[in-house]
Image: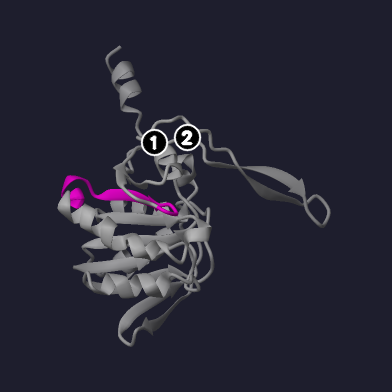
Amino acid sequence: MRILITNDDSISAEQLLPLVKYCRKLGEVTVAVPKHEQSAKSHGINIHHPFEVTQQTFDGDIPVYVVDSTPADCVRFAVLGLKLKFDLIISGINRGFNMGTDMLYSGTVSAVREAGILGLPAIALSTSPEYYDKALNHLDTVFDYITRHKLLEVHSLYNINIPPKSHEIKITRQGGVYFSDTFVEAEGDNMYQASGICAYQNSDDSTLDTDAVMAGYISITPITINMTDREIFEKLANN
């Protein structure tokens, strides 16, 4: 299996090398990651200006491309620029959950959506900041589940969140708002800074990724790049 690993936490992410070493037992690994942190950059790509790409290696022989752009551009560069072929793209492990409507902001999840646009299977992996250095311990459970249930044969794009003290795995759907912001004045004239606040409200519905993760389940959510509201489309088209 040929695997591309990317993230939005940059080449400096502490769990990048451990993830690369883990994935090496799954197949041949290539890395393409941002030079600088790209959290909450969503699906942005750079089409007007050139960007730098430098190369290094991990573990002696694993090729690593450091891309001075977004996670989506990392995927685009590896596939469209280098003309490399991949069987799976893995994005993460992100330091912070990507669930509910927060997926729309996520650079981690956007790398997976870019893979979908390019016709490639992909999974996003995220966890809470306080569990960041331990989430890797659950990857055997996650990949065993994916293999046993043939998830990548059923669908190609998944968003996975690993909570602290996680136990079972649940297949989930996108929940509501998990995090929001208020804005406070910052140093300097007319300067403001976003300040994050938790906006999660428990619906007691473990089919939602937000509720499942808050209850301690590993959440696996099938996602899509198709933004059409099919119910409304059918209603309007049949008028």
Q: Is residue 236 visible?
A: yes
Residue 33: x %, y % from top left: 42, 69
- Image check: 60 left or right of 1? right
SS state under label 1:
loop
For residue 172, what is the image quadrant?
top left
Q: Say few, some or many: other residues with alpha carbon within 10 Å of mark 1 (under 14 / 14 to 19 / 20 or more).
A: many
Q: Is residue 158 magenta?
A: yes
Furthest-right residue in view?
189
Q: Which amino acid lies under the numbered mark 2 shown in the image of this protein?
A: Gly
Looking at the image, tell me whether mark 2 or mark 1 is earlier in sequence order. Answer: 2
Residue picked out by circle 2: 176
SS state under label 2:
loop
- Image check: 150 left or right of 171? left
Q: Is residue 21 magenta?
A: no
Residue picked out by circle 1: 208
Magenta range is: 150-165
Tell me if residue 233 comes above or below residue 171 in the rendering: above
